[in-house]
Amino acid sequence: MNKVRRIAAIIGIILLLGMYVVAFVAGVGKWEHSHEVFMVALYMTIAVPVIIYIMQAFYKLGKKKNGESPEQSPGDRENGKDKE
């Protein structure tokens, strides 16, 4: 589970950095649609982390309803590796 989280975090960092680069280039660019590209990149810079946060909150809420610890994966429970 930690490997999946680490890969997801790296992908998220790459996406956010890409959006920052696009926002910067669009902000200093002088082409026809630079303002629209800048606004979309700025919006996505805010929206993507908020969406990820909401998804994590729902995941933890779903784990609590099933009676599992949010940090404990099903594989750990089956192998007898309790976090407590």
Image (cartoon, helix red, strand yellow):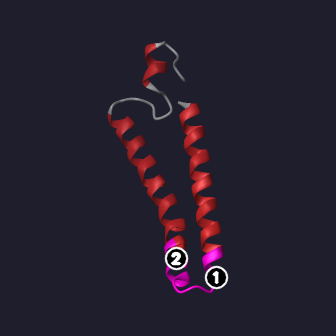
Residue depicted at x 48% and y 28%: 72
Task: Inspect the image, locate mark 2, and give the three-letter code of the amino acid beneath it.
Answer: Val
Marks 1 and 2, how far apart in space? 10 Å
> Dot 1 corresponds to which residue?
29
> Dot 2 corresponds to which residue?
37
Q: Is label 1 in contact with label 2 (beta carbons under 8 Å)?
A: yes
| Direction from residue 14 to residue 58 in the image, left or right | left
Please rate how many residues cluster around mark 2, counting C-alpha atoms within 10 Å: few if below 14, some from 14 to 19, many from 20: some
* Callout 1 secondary element: loop
Q: Position of residue 58 (x, y in %)?
A: 38, 47
On whether residue 43 falls in the magenta region, the answer is: no
50 above or below 2?
below
| Direction from residue 57 to residue 15 in the image, left or right | right
The stretch of residues the image draws in magenta is 25-40
Please rate how many residues cluster around mark 1, counting C-alpha atoms within 10 Å: few if below 14, some from 14 to 19, many from 20: some
Please report whichever mark, 1 or 2, sits nearer to the chain's N-terminal start: 1
Residue depicted at x 46% and y 35%: 70
| Direction from residue 65 to residue 33 in the image, left or right | right
Task: Inspect the image, locate mark 1, and give the three-letter code of the amino acid beneath it.
Answer: Gly
